[in-house]
Image: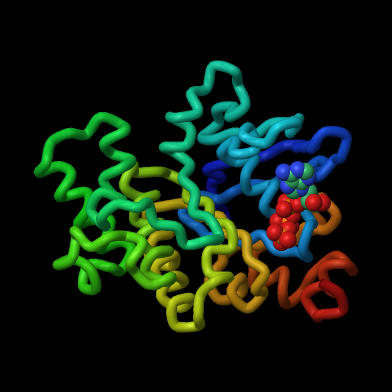
Amino acid sequence: MERCPAMQTDCVNLYYGQKQALFDVTMPVYAHAITALIGPSGCGKSTFLRTLNRMNDYIKGARVEGSVRLDGEEVYDSAVSLTALRKKVGMVFQQPIALSKSVYDNIAYGPRIHGVRDKTALDTIVRNCLKLAAMGEEVGSRLHTAGPSLSGGQRQRLAIARALAVEPDVLLLDEPTSALDPISTMKIENVLLSLKKQYTIVIVTHNMEQAKRISDYTGFFLNGRLVEFDETARLFANPTQEETKRYITGQFG
Ligand SMILES: Nc1ncnc2c1ncn2[C@@H]1O[C@H](COP(=O)(O)OP(=O)(O)OP(=O)(O)O)[C@@H](O)[C@H]1O
């Protein structure tokens, strides 16, 4: 499968103060595909995910070395606008948080920040994003319901809709289903599968079955290093590294 990377990291090292959390991570993020990041707790999956849209900039003492490129442009270049970067590379977090606003205003929040004022344009964005997040039927007629009053699974799909509202190219998700029941998890997985035609997706997951079900590529992290990266089917069926084999067969984790 010959594919084009939407993002590429080269020799990324990340330090929290004196402590090094990522070591020489070189990995492509292929366009219009789902990439899963797996590995035991504390191996650096979330840290790596956050390097892709510079969310680590918010962590005091965090320092990044190496290169992260988005469509060939250096993400860590000092001239890069963080607002513009985060518009292109959106993020959904582990806890399904809805802003204490209506469903409509949750989704319209980003576009308004980016200057969309026209009511008809906002209405269209809200409806399209609800549809993309498979929420049109559930809440399409209740746009003024408070976001926080939705169920956990709905709040997480609302978070996806909110992230999509600013038309990102890449969507990063940090364990988006770990707080959800199996049905809500399945709905999110189906949403992600339908989104990959239009978007590039990177998901951190503790759940290897989830990685197998939905991802095209998987990166296995251990102790801050990317031990193995491959097409998901190949990595799980035929890992080249002994540590990958031990991890995916449940010998540690
Ligand atoms: N804000 C921080 N300050 C200092 N150290 C941190 C910070 N965030 C993470 N770390 C450390 O960096 C290492 C990697 O953490 P990270 O959260 O990226 O791992 P992870 O694989 O995502 O773990 P989990 O699956 O438990 O979420 C760990 O040793 C962690 O303690």
Look at 24% across and 73% down and name the residue there. Answer: 138
Q: Quadrant of residue 12?
A: top right
Q: Is residue 246 above or below residue 204?
A: below
Residue 233's x, y, as percent? 65, 73
Quarter of the image with the N terminus in it? bottom right
Q: Judge left or right: residue 45 versus residue 54.
A: right
Q: Position of residue 207 (x, y in %)?
A: 65, 73
With respect to residue 246, does 91 lie above or below?
Answer: above
Q: Residue at x 30, y 68 (%)?
A: 134
On the image, the x and y values in percent for residue 11 come to: 77, 37
64 or 201, which is in the foreground? Answer: 64
The answer to whether residue 217 is left or right of residue 146 is: right
Q: Is residue 72 visible?
A: yes
Identify the residue at image location x=50%, y=83%.
182
> Which quarter of the rendering shows the C terminus?
bottom right
Kindly give the residue lying farthest to the top in the view shown. Answer: 79
Q: Position of residue 74 (x, y in %)?
A: 59, 27
Q: Quadrant of residue 251?
A: bottom right
218 w.r.t. 29: above or below: below
Please say whether residue 64 is visible from this viewpoint. no
Q: Is residue 172 above or below residue 15?
A: below
- At a point 69% along the width and 70% down the height, the residue shown is 234
* Left or right of residue 68: residue 16: right
